[in-house]
Amino acid sequence: MNEILKKSAAEQSKALKNKEISAVELTNAAFERIAELDEKLGAFNSLTKETALETAKKVDEKIAKSEELPLLAGVPLALKDNMNLVGSKTTASSKILENFVSPFNATVTEKLLNNLVPIVGKANLDEFAMGSSNENSAFKKVHNPWDLKKVPGGSSGGSAASVSSCEATLALGSDTGGSIRLPASFCGIVGMKPTYGRVSRYGLIAFASSLDQIGPFARTVEDAANLLEVISGHDPKDSTSLDLPVEHYAAHLNDDIKGMKVGVIKELMTEGLSDDVAAAMQRAIEDYKKLGAEIVEISLPNLKHSIGIYYILATAECSSNLARFDGVKYGYRTPDAKNLMEMYTKTRAEGFGPEVKRRIMLGTYALSSGYYDAYYKKAQQMRALVTQDFVEAFKKVDILISPTCPNTAFELGAKSSDPLAMYLTDIATISANLAGIPGMSVPAGFDKDGMPIGLQILAPQLKESRLFNAAHKFERANDYYLQLAKI
Ligand code: GLN
């Protein structure tokens, strides 16, 4: 592998400006790495070589004319395959969209292209972003770069694996219940879910619209902060996007955190925690103390309900969002239907995988008359209580910390026949989506088998700068982020 691929985006940007390498060379180096590795890894559903090289050429033209480069120009990026890029297939890793070609760009894609970020390919995911291990892709499983027998986490497993293995320097994922933070933690990189509404969802294939949010993957907190800056902002095409100015998040990375109040989430420090993750948490707490932070224990009494709430709301929303895949407007249509009704039912029966069908059925049930009040309405009420827990907590502390997951990456196949065990993987991440607050996972050490452990940091709504600051200080107090998967 070309050594430049191991560098951070900040370092690659510098190398481009200093003409140590051209953007076309850097992009080609990424494609060579993908060619050498991706058969084993399965991180990409498709490559977008033409678009990427076209963008890289524009960067080189600017450099030749000594023009100023936009943030992250020329740095190779993987786009999760549920975001539209004109001319590329956007499959959501589903058979029902296997041959669907994007007719328009997602807003995040537009922003990346405006900043001349070469998009090298579409990253594999769990079908329609439903899953925690990336085993639910209709096409192929993604393998964890640290141990190919293990899962990379999901649903943005391809995005995380590509950055962790240096196939790409950056990636975008979407996070509905933890799909950025969990794979970041399992793959030993940084993954961040912004405040709900900070990033436009236009052009993202909807899973659960009140929870979905697009966010960055990177190998350093600084790179993630810069990528968030590039993709954030108000978008009239997404009515839930916030009309607030975009901040320069990297400006506060080095602010002193002396006196910062760091809350440790009590409920996530006990049950089911592996010994290695527990030890990593103790080390993280000590690191924050050394940085001058004050550690406070915080209880979130309703957190235990978050998985139950999520699996009613997310499935209800997905049953409605996925109604559009009916064989008429886009994607797959069954070849042999005798009438319209049969065309709908066969198309959906043949096009959706088992987990997606399970979610549609659960959601349809929760929304059906007679059950709506008992399930959907109750879950909405409970969601308000979870949100209120965070409001109370953030009156006492500036940020909250917990493990991103009680355990490290598990073996492929270990949980795929037990949906409930799989759902429980998200115990630490889901509540941030219910409350709409920003959260991230930062590398926090390794277990006895050398698998990465993630520290989750949460902040109040729109306090992304504080989150990046606290994460950067922790990152630089250790050298975990410098260790790369040996693959
Ligand atoms: N693992 C969770 C699920 O399967 C979260 C997925 C996500 O964040 N997209 O729903």
Image (spheres, rainbow, N blue to C red):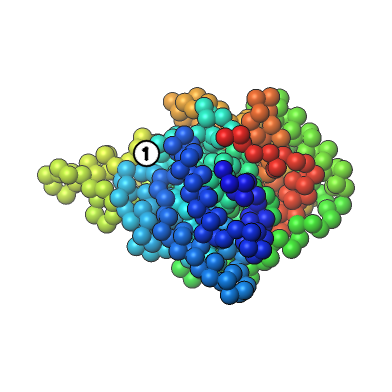
In the rendered image, which quarter contains the N terminus? top right
* Foreground residue among 419 and 59: 59
| Left or right position of 349 against 180 | left
Q: Tell me what residue is drawn at x 50 percent, y 68 percent.
A: 58
Picture layout, residue 75 above or below residue 287: below
Residue 362, position in %: x, y? 40, 39
Residue 88, position in %: x, y? 37, 56
Picture layout, residue 358 above or below residue 85: above
* Foreground residue among 175 and 361: 175
Residue 307, position in %: x, y? 55, 38
In the rendered image, which quarter contains the C terminus? top right
Amino acid bearing label 1:
Phe
Residue 236, position in %: x, y? 49, 71
Residue count near mark 1 (Cα–Cα under 10 Å), binned few <14, some 14–19, many ≥20 = some
- Mark 1, residue position: 139
Specify whether residue 153 is in view: yes
Q: In which quarter of the image is residue 233?
A: bottom right
Q: Tell me what residue is drawn at x 69 percent, y 31 percent.
A: 446
* Foreground residue among 31 and 237: 31
Instruction: Residue at the far left: name it.
Output: 338
* Foreground residue among 12 and 171: 12
Specify whether residue 366 is in view: no
